[in-house]
Amino acid sequence: MTPSRTRRDFFAWSRNLLAAGGFAQTASLRGAPPPPVAADGEDYYDKLGVTKIINAAGTYTILTASTMPPAVQAAVARAAKNPVRLIELQTKAGEYLAKRLRCEAAMVTAGAASALTLGTSGCLIVMNKCTPHDVPMGVAGLKNEVIVQKAHRYGYDHALLNCGIRFVEVETMADYEGAFNQRTAMTHFFNAAEQGRISREDWIRVAHQHGVPCFNDAAADVPPVANLWNYTQMGFDLVTFSGGKGIRGPQNAGLLLGRKDLIAAAAASNNPFDDCVGRGMKVAKEQIVGMVAAVDWFLSQSDEAMQAEFERRAGRISAFLKDVPTLECRTFVPPIANQVPHLLIRYDQQRVKISPLEVKEKLSRGTPSIELNPATGSNDGSAGLPADANTIVVGVWMLEPGEDMIVARRLREVLMSAV
């Protein structure tokens, strides 16, 4: 057999092998059948020894945020089966989301923090007529100031600093009106801030008088569903939402919504393009599809139905605890972020001799492991919730069906053991 004939035979054999099932069958051709795989995949949490939890806290990143609904999980799994052209997927997903969310343009980002960086980069590019390559190092001598209320400085604004901006803090309307100059590139508003003297409407009006775009971080501010378009229609030029919180999409996905030119500049700063501030902020095809599917799912929900279900869960837990001495329960809905019913539990610690923090720790260490809201037994508010050392806070909205009663039984066990 000649070398050329051997090579032709090899490629013919390869084509036939791929047509018959590809590399997945090579093991069986060698006499070793592939290992069996469960229809729903191997449980790698168990394999790795990772503890599964019941999330009675909320959509906190450290607790892997929300659980995707079955329809979203199925869309993610199906998207994993085929490669596509990433830019085409991002573009068409953005066009679809913009129509559904009633804004000029949209983009799926690697979470809300990524959207803050990319949106800020987009504003710098448009305001300076520069290129993505200029962000962050090349904007030092250009328009790079971002005006923000002092009360709106928060732990996530480092995402803006990544673009080479400088914050200018204001407190009063007079401060705000006097802060604009030839170096102003953007204004930033933290939607869930409980303090600050300048309203959203005034913030937008003054910025637009100076021709400056306004960015609103509303990461955790759904439900209600209508917030997905309320703020862009109010006049904010860019708005971001987290994908893995109330929308129930992938945790590593988010939404950037707003003006078409700013979104286009943000997209030019994003993966897969090289030499730009967002190169490492990859959103896989599965997460893009998952985010679109989550928006479809979320828009099919009713605010009233969601709130009623969360109230029912809180009611079932409080009813199960009714015989715990001195115990009082009430529900509380934060005014902006995480605007859903939370169950607040208080009791006399002279009668029930265990602190809320100790209850939280016992539930976390137990089986099943249950995480209560971080505000439990704390003097630091969490997501607008009232917090003190005498209160247990149960976040019911991320519980799976039936988990409310598991939480109720464990709470009763721990509390009654301290009577």
Image (cartoon, rainbow, N blue to C red):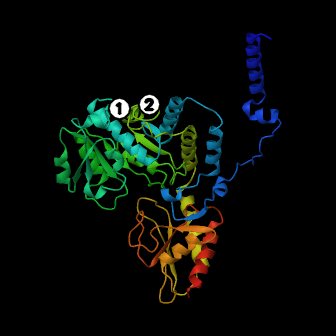
Q: Earlier in the sequence, mark 1 or mark 2?
A: 1
Residue projecting furthest to the right: 31
Quadrant of the rendering where the N terminus is positioned: top right
| In-front residue for pair 329/389 | 389
Residue 132 numbered mark, or none: 1
Residue that appears at 40% across and 64% down = 384
Q: Residues within 10 Å of mark 1 (few under 14, many from 20)?
A: many
Residue that appears at 34% across and 31% down = 133
Quadrant of the rendering where the C terminus is positioned: bottom right
Image x and y of residue 65, in percent: 52, 56
**Viewed as shown, does residue 190 lie left or right of 357?**
left
Going by the numbered disc 2, the residue's amino acid type is Phe
**Viewed as shown, does residue 94 lie left or right of 166?**
right
Looking at the image, how many numbered discs can be counted on the residues?
A: 2
- Whether label 1 touches label 2, CB < 8 Å: yes
Visible residue check, residue 59 = no
Image x and y of residue 148, in percent: 27, 51
Image x and y of residue 226, in percent: 46, 50
Image x and y of residue 200, in percent: 31, 52
| In-front residue for pair 317/158 | 158
**Viewed as shown, does residue 268 lie left or right of 393?**
left
Residue 50 numbered mark, or none: none
Going by the numbered disc 1, the residue's amino acid type is Pro
Residue that appears at 59% across and 73% down = 317
